[in-house]
Amino acid sequence: MTRVTVFPLRPTLVRDTRTMPSGAPADDLGVAAGCIRPLSVENTVEDVSPPDRLIRAMRPMVPSTAVVTDLHAHTNRSDGSHPPAELVDIAAALEVGVLAITDHDTLAGVEEALARGRATGVRVIPGIELSIKMPHGSMHLLGYFTDPAPAPLVGMIAGFAATRTERAEQMVERLHGLGLPLDWQDVLDGAAGAPLGRPHIAEALIRGGYVSTRKEAFDLYLADGGPAYMGSDGLDAEEGVRLVLESGGAPVLAHPETLKLDDAHLDPFVGRLARAGLVGIEVHRPEHTPDQFARFGALAGRWDLIASGGSDYHRPTSPHHPGATGDPPLSTDTADHLLGAVLR
Ligand code: AMP
Ligand code: ZN
Ligand code: FE
Ligand code: FE
């Protein structure tokens, strides 16, 4: 029998404005169903300041009673338009109670978002969206952490940025080959130090007068498989899953549809990742059709993965606002389940 230690938590520990709703009953402090994990630490925290490790272990066990949870959003530290604090303010205004910051290949927005989360009552989850090298289609792997600077991942960020710069340079060369003499320096300036992505190239194409909209830039040149598109050249899928796990995080497969695999190929691929330690898969995304929702939900069930998701919000012109996670929406205890699954 598994012995489960349930702590008589100190009120100051659990009545955390980041996880408790305003006006929640004072005794509404039960442990979320399914999130109870046996911990190796004993309860010696009654009168002493609890060690960080204990707090980190407890946090995912505190039930999330937030109104809305969104586990996929970008800031201007990658290819979004809002500074991290502003994104958290928007989330707060939209009554998003739990928000993961998942910038492309960087953790640079996490600290600022966490600080703003403490000030506004939004529970900010440190996260990242890693680009994965794939022979066909494109794959993004989300990672969710309790630590804002998870090692060894944090030590690899500079390398990811260098890989992205090289790739963007190659895409700009392809555009040159297509007769569009796009200014590389303008691409760099537009990104303002963020790891370079296709949206930065799209914006430079607009500024240069080569296209009039972002959509045109993608439709004509940059979309997956487009004439200027280059795939990612970094970690492969299993390396990505292992890296997130080794860094104490929960790996989640983002937007499975971009893998461009039919069921006969998607199922064994997800199975392989599940065996490598994948914890979740995005099921709840606002653009998912009922058919995609059913397909990816079934995959989650089959491979014992947590059905995760989010808005993938980037900017005010994004098709969906922060907190939009589809119908039915993302379950509000998803962050606890994901983080609870990799407690150590
Ligand atoms: P990258 O990481 O450089 O491959 O760029 C991926 C990002 O480009 C995505 O997160 C979106 O922000 C954006 N993106 C990808 N495909 C499209 C598209 N067809 N239209 C508009 N934006 C897109
Ligand atoms: Zn993006
Ligand atoms: Fe993505
Ligand atoms: Fe994204």
Image (cartoon, rainbow, N blue to C red):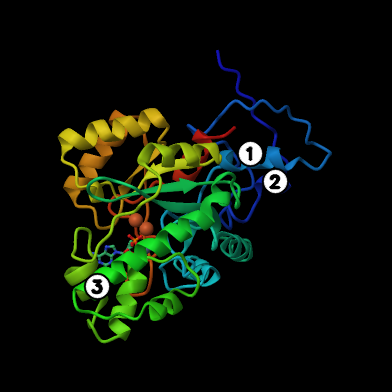
Q: Which mark is residue 13?
A: 2
Looking at marks 1 and 2 on the same chain, the residue that comes earlier in the sequence is marked by: 2
What residue is pinned by disc 1?
58
Q: Locate the C terminus by quadrant.
A: top right
Disc nearest the viewer among 2 and 3: 3
- Residue 177, given in percent of the width and then of the height, sits at 21, 72
Quarter-of-image position of residue 184: bottom left
Do residues under tags 1 and 2 come within 8 Å of each other at their CB atoms?
A: yes
Q: Specify the amino acid type for callout 3.
A: Leu
In the displayed structure, does residue 67 sit left or right of residue 9?
Answer: left
The foreground one among 250 and 337 is 250
> What secondary structure is found at the residue carrying circle 1?
helix
Disc nearest the viewer among 1 and 3: 3
- Residue 95, given in percent of the width and then of the height, sits at 47, 63
Looking at marks 1 and 3 on the same chain, the residue that comes earlier in the sequence is marked by: 1
What residue is pinned by disc 3?
175
The foreground one among 155 and 177 is 177
Q: Locate the N terminus by quadrant.
A: top right
Q: Quadrant of ligand 3?
A: bottom left
Quarter-of-image position of residue 207: bottom left
- Residue 146, given in percent of the width and then of the height, sits at 58, 46
- Residue 103, given in percent of the width and then of the height, sits at 45, 59
Marks 1 and 3, how far apart at CA: 51 Å
> What secondary structure is found at the residue carrying circle 3?
helix
Q: Specify the amino acid type for callout 1.
A: Met
